Image: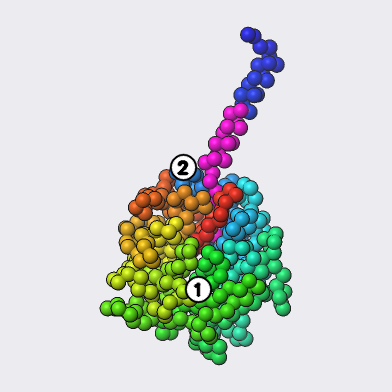
Amino acid sequence: MKFGKVGQITLVSAIALTVATLFTACNRTLTVGFMYVATNKQTPGQIEVYEVNSESGALRTIPTSPFPSGGRNPIAEVPSPDSKNLYVANEDDNNVVQFGIGNDGKLYAQSTVNTPGAFPLAITLNSANSFLYGVDTLQPIAGCTLTNACPGDVFVCPINTDGSLGTPVNNTSQCLNYYPLQLKASDTTTILTPTAVNITADGKYLYVSAYNPATSKGYLFAFAANTDGTLTSLNGDAPFLLESQPAGQSSPAVLKQPVALASDANGQFLYVADKLTNQVATYTLTAGAPSSTTPAAVATTNITAATGNQPSSLTLAGTDFLYVTNSLDSTVSAYSTSSGSLTNIGTYASDTNPIAIAGDPRKLGFLYTVNFLGNTLSGYQINSTTGTLVNTKNTPYLSTVQPTAIAGIPHGGTATAAAK
């Protein structure tokens, strides 16, 4: 059969279109989702966007990355459960910015609110995507500054049905409400510095870790998260002191500077990493509260597990494995979990100074660390049977400068965020 010139051109065009379609479909299949990485060197800060390759776990920046974070020093991020929005806390501008997420991973700033106090450093969302919870380093007390410090606070921001940050109550620059993080209601002078916030998967209980820099004592605030956004303390006016002799144990499990929290999907256990004592402790949860003021004796000899030097963040991979970044050692410690008890699997090198960690957004078994001083991200693949780690292709991945936080969304799935 012979073709004229027009027929040849038509045939070539059809073949090219078919190849392009197949190539595009292939790319869409290989791009399992997007990881968002906050970097704080520029003013304003930036959010870098990476595509995640579903086969290798490798990361690649999208062409339009990075995007302005909406403030100085972006320090924390959390995606909405429906993967349509990303919320970013900018520490030096005391604000939280909501970004809409495009189908191609691009970010579009939508709304901004100021936090009640100063220097927000951690945020989280409930599973219903109705409230955003965060912690400020300093609560709004007259005369309270970094040089004349006061206790921190936990704040609540309503989320509208379109994902935007809701109209604040009482003051147009503040979120719904805030709760002082104090030893008791009348004590506004003892400094308790919050470090992390975590909400259970069912959205019923909220936890905030804090420490006293003068006494090196660690604390845990536990709240019932009510449906109207208010919080009810589970221990009266006082936090739980993370320092005591557990029943039946030969040595105390003392936490001096808890810096990261993670709770399991069933709301049974809360894991707490401590920066000064180089350990991660397990707490059992009864009606949302720790069963005692000490780490629960979930195993007779292993209520805590040793980490590397200066653990900084942690995350769970399913129900079987826990991973902790060690900022001073530039490593990741891996543990298997059994009824809350932790057994060390191994230690794996990262790039310099890992401070945040997150799994891939489609839960395919990839893991990423944010390396602040290395200006990189390290990637790993998790062995689903043993929990051991191997490096992903082309790791580490170059970041702009000083990355601080990481969060991920899939295409049309459940979002994931770094635990701190």
- The three-letter amino acid code for the residue at tag 1 is Gly
120, above or below 106, in the image:
below
- Residue type beneath disc 2: Glu
Task: Pinpoint residue 386: horizontal percent, then vertical percent.
Answer: 34, 52
Q: Nearer the viewer, residue 161 or 370?
A: 161
Q: Residue at x 35, y 70 (%)?
A: 298
- Residue 227, compared with residue 240, is above or below; it is above
Query: What secondary structure characterizes most of the magenta part?
Result: helix
* Picture quadrant of residue 329: bottom left
Instruction: Give the label, 1 or 2, closer to the camera.
Output: 1
Which label was assigned to residue 288? 1
Question: Which badge, 1 or 2, comes first in the chain's sequence?
Answer: 2
Viewer-proximal residue among 195 and 177: 177
- Quadrant in the picture for residue 86: bottom right
Q: Residue at x 38, y 69 (%)?
A: 280
Q: Give the quarter of the figure containing the N terminus.
A: top right
Disc 2 element: loop
Nearer the observer, 122 or 5: 122
Residue 121 visible in this rendered orientation of the protein = no
* Location of residue 145 in the rendering, given as x and y in whole percent from the top left corner: 57, 82
Residue placed under numbered mark 2 in the picture: 55
Quick check: 388 above or below 122?
A: above
Residue at disc 1, secondary structure: loop
| Pick the front one: 72 or 170 | 170
Q: Position of residue 208 (x, y in %)?
A: 51, 74
Q: Which span of residues is magenta-colored?
A: 18-38
Residue 239 place in picture, x, y as percent: 49, 82
